[in-house]
Structures are given as structure tokens and as C-alpha cells.
Image (cartoon, rainbow, N blue to C red):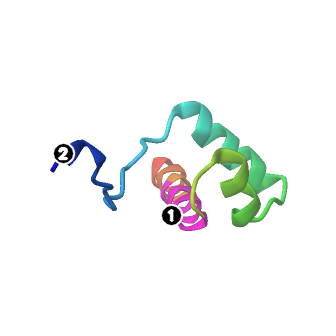
Amino acid sequence: MDNMYIESNQRTYKHWSTLEDCKLISLREEGFKYREIASKLERTKLSVEKRYRKLKNQRNDAY
């Protein structure tokens, strides 16, 4: 049996780039919903929500 053809159900984490962070913040401030942003950034809705909250908390902690 050749292991090369076995499918994997593992999730892979895709790191957020600075550009993606900027787009996320900008789109959210323009009133886009998480679902819409997720589609534009090719991310899950949950991933977008969590990242936005993290970025927002980091901004608040900086002041």
C-alpha cells in the first residue's frame, strides 16, 4: 500500500500577514460582516472573528 495517496484530515494553520491584518481591520470598519470578510480573505468566519478581536485587544492595550 502506498502512503502517498492517503488523505489527511488534519487542519493546517495559515499565518496572518500584516497585509491581511490591515485588510481585516479596514473591511470591518467599513461595516463588512465577518462572513463577508472571511470569503474575501479565504479564511473561516471563526478565524476572522478571533483575529479581529485579538487585533482590537492589542490596539487597546497599546494605549
**Residue under the point 54% across and 62% down:** 53
Please state which amino acid type lies under the numbered disc 2: Asp
Image spot of residue 54 (x, y percent) = 48, 58
Q: Badge 2 is on which residue?
A: 2
51 to the left or right of 26: left
Examine the structure image and report whether residue 50 is included in the region drawn in magenta.
yes
At x 62% / y 48%, what residue is drawn?
Answer: 42
Nearer-N-terminus badge (2/1): 2
Pointer 1 residue: 50
Check whether the beta carbons of the residues at disc 2 and disc 1 lie within 8 A of each other. Answer: no
Q: Which residues are magenta?
A: 45-54
Magenta segment includes 32: no
- Is residue 28 left or right of 54 when viewed as pictured? right
Q: Is residue 19 above or below residue 42?
A: above
In this view, 18 is above or below 45: above
* In the foreground, 35 or 49: 35
> Could you say where residue 11 lies in the image, as x and y percent from the top left?
36, 58
Q: Position of residue 33 (x, y in %)?
A: 76, 65
Where is residue 40? Give x, y as percent: 72, 48
Q: Residues within 10 Å of mark 2 (few under 14, many from 20)?
A: few
Secondary structure under tag 1 reads: helix
